[in-house]
Image (cartoon, helix red, strand yellow):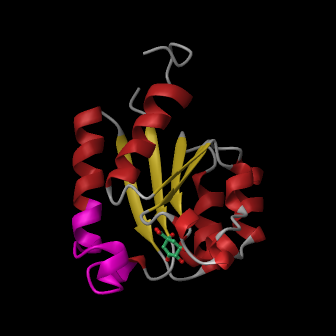
């Protein structure tokens, strides 16, 4: 059975290519979705990629993933640093989740050093640009969801 992965992107990630290109690069959100979909196809996985500027919508999408998706890749964007609701949603559904950030948040402002969702994430990948999403998919498929107990 193909593994089902849900990729969720938080606020302002739809502005990729326009927003702060010196931090996030010049590639667009559409470019990101294309790369994720291509990688999923190459890896034989089923993927759904979503973006929302609303915390409530993101919480609802996590809840609706229950019983359907095997893994979640989540870039909560600014909600990373504020949202207990997203943390609780991940804990509620118990679906393995990888936290992704395009930029290296560890090198940025103090207020970005807090991540609530990290408490429920199996891994955090940051500072790898768009490749971080592909790495996250590989972590889920090869380590967390692998039928061989994580051996490669
Ligand atoms: C981000 C980092 C966050 O601090 C920021 O609020 C974002 C994007 C990243 O992908 O690097 O919107 O999650």
Vertical relation: 148 (above or below) 89: above
Percent position of residue 19, x then y: 35, 86
Query: In the image, is residue 92 part of the stretch drawn in magenta?
Result: no
Q: Is residue 12 above or below residue 32?
A: below
In the picture as drawn, the residue positioned furthest to the front comes out as 107
Whether residue 28 sits left or right of residue 69 in the image: it is left
- Image quarter where the C terminus lies is top left
Residue at the (44%, 27%) spot, across then down: 142
Image check: 138 left or right of 89? left
Q: Residue 12 is drawn in which quadrant?
A: bottom left
Image point (72%, 50%), residue name: 120
- Residue in the image at 74% along x and 53% along y: 119
Residue segment shown in magenta: 14-33
Q: Is residue 31 magenta?
A: yes
120 over 24 or under it: above or below = above
Q: Quadrant of the N terminus?
A: top left
Q: Position of residue 112 (x, y in %)?
A: 63, 73
How many numbered circles does the render carry? 0
Residue 35 in the image: x percent, y percent?
Answer: 24, 55
The picture quadrant where one finds residue 26 is: bottom left
Q: Nearer the viewer, residue 69 or 114?
A: 114
Residue 3 visible in the picture: yes
Please tell me whether residue 86 is drawn above or below residue 134 in the rendered image. Answer: below
Where does the image place residue 6, in percent across and percent down from the top left?
A: 47, 52
Q: Is residue 69 something that shows in the picture?
A: no
Q: State which quadrant residue 32 falls in.
A: bottom left
Left or right, 85 with reference to 104: right
């Amino acid at each position: 059975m193909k593994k089902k992965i849900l990729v969720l992107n938080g606020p302002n990630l739809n502005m990729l290519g326009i927003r702060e290109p010196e931090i996030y690069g010049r590639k667009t959100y559409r470019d990101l979705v294309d790369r994720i979909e291509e990688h999923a196809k190459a890896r034989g996985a089923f993927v759904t990629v979503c973006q929302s500027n609303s915390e409530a919508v993101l919480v609802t999408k996590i809840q609706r993933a229950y019983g359907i998706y095997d893994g979640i890749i989540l870039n909560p964007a600014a909600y990373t640093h504020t949202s207990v609701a997203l943390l609780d949603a991940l804990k509620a559904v118990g679906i393995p989740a990888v936290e992704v950030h395009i930029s290296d948040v560890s090198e940025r402002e103090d207020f970005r050093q807090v991540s609530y969702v990290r408490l429920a994430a199996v891994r955090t990948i940051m500072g790898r640009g768009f490749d971080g999403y592909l790495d996250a998919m590989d972590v889920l498929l090869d380590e967390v969801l692998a039928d061989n107990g994580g051996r490669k």
